[in-house]
Image (cartoon, rainbow, N blue to C red):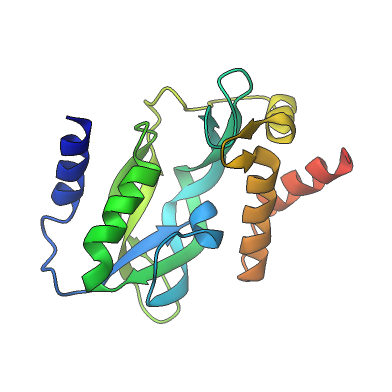
Amino acid sequence: MANKRHALSVDDLLAGWNGVDDLWVFAYGSLIWHPGFAWRERRLATVRGYHRSLCLWSHDHRGSPDNPGLVFGLDRGGCCRGVAFQIAASDVPGVFQALWRREMVTGAYTPRWLTCHTEASPVRGLVFLLNRACNEYAADISDDRLLASVRNAVGHSGPCLDYVVETERALRAHGIDDCRLGDLVRKLAQAF
C-alpha cells in the first residue's frame, strides 16, 4: 500500500508534465553534493519565500532514536541560494521515483513546483519544502542543543557533523555564502 501511495504521489506531481520537456530540481542541502541522479545542467538558483534551516530531527540517516541529529529543511521566510539541476525528460520518471524514496519517507517535506531564479532565466523546479506539521520538525531549539545534536549524532548515513560541514563546503564551492551556516560550522570547529 505504501508503494502504491508513493507512486501516486509522483504521478500526481507529474500530472501536468508533457513527458517531453526536461524538468528541474532545486537542491539546498545534501542534494547539492550528493544528488544521486544524472543531470543535464546545473545552475545556481534562488528560491524566494523560504530559507535553509537545520530544523528537522533525523532518527535514522544522521542520528538515532536515542540521539537524533538534525537535517536541513526549507522553512518559511527569507530566500535560499542553492543549485537547480536539470533532469533530462527520459530520466524524469526514474529520478523522481528515487527522489521520493529519499525525501518523502517520513512526511517531513512537501513537494512543490516553485520558480527558481537563475542568472540565465527563471526555471520552474521541484522544491522539497519543510512540512511544519510533521513529527520531525525541530521548532525553537536552543543553540546549545543544536550544537550538541550536530556534534554527537550519528546515523546510518554517517555523522550529522559531516552532513552539516559537507553542505557548507559545497555551498562555498559554488560561491554561495550562507552566513548562518558558516557561523554554525565555525562554532562546531571550536569544539575540536
Occupied quadrant, residue 76: top left
- Name the residue furthest top: 66
Q: Which residue is painted at 55% across and 39% down in the image?
A: 71
- Residue 150 image offset from top left, x and y in percent: 69, 35
Inspect this view and state whether residue 128 appears.
Answer: yes
Q: Observer-nearest residue: 73 or 1?
A: 1
- Most extreme residue toward the bottom is 120
Judge whether residue 29 can be spotted in this image.
no
The quadrant where residue 19 appears: bottom left
Q: Position of residue 82 (x, y in %)?
A: 51, 62
Place of residue 134 in the rendered image (x, y in percent of width and height, measured from the top left):
39, 26
**Quadrant of the image containing the N terminus:** top left
The C terminus lies in quadrant? top right
Q: Nearer the viewer, residue 82 or 140?
A: 82
Q: Residue at x 48, y 56 (%)?
A: 31
Q: In the rendered view, would you say 57 is above or below 180?
A: above
- Residue 93 falls left or right of residue 99: left
- Tell me how many marks there are: 0
Question: In the picture provided, is 43 more to the left or to the right than 8?
Answer: right
Q: As drawn, is 127 to the left or to the right of 70? A: left
Q: Position of residue 129 (x, y in %)?
A: 38, 44
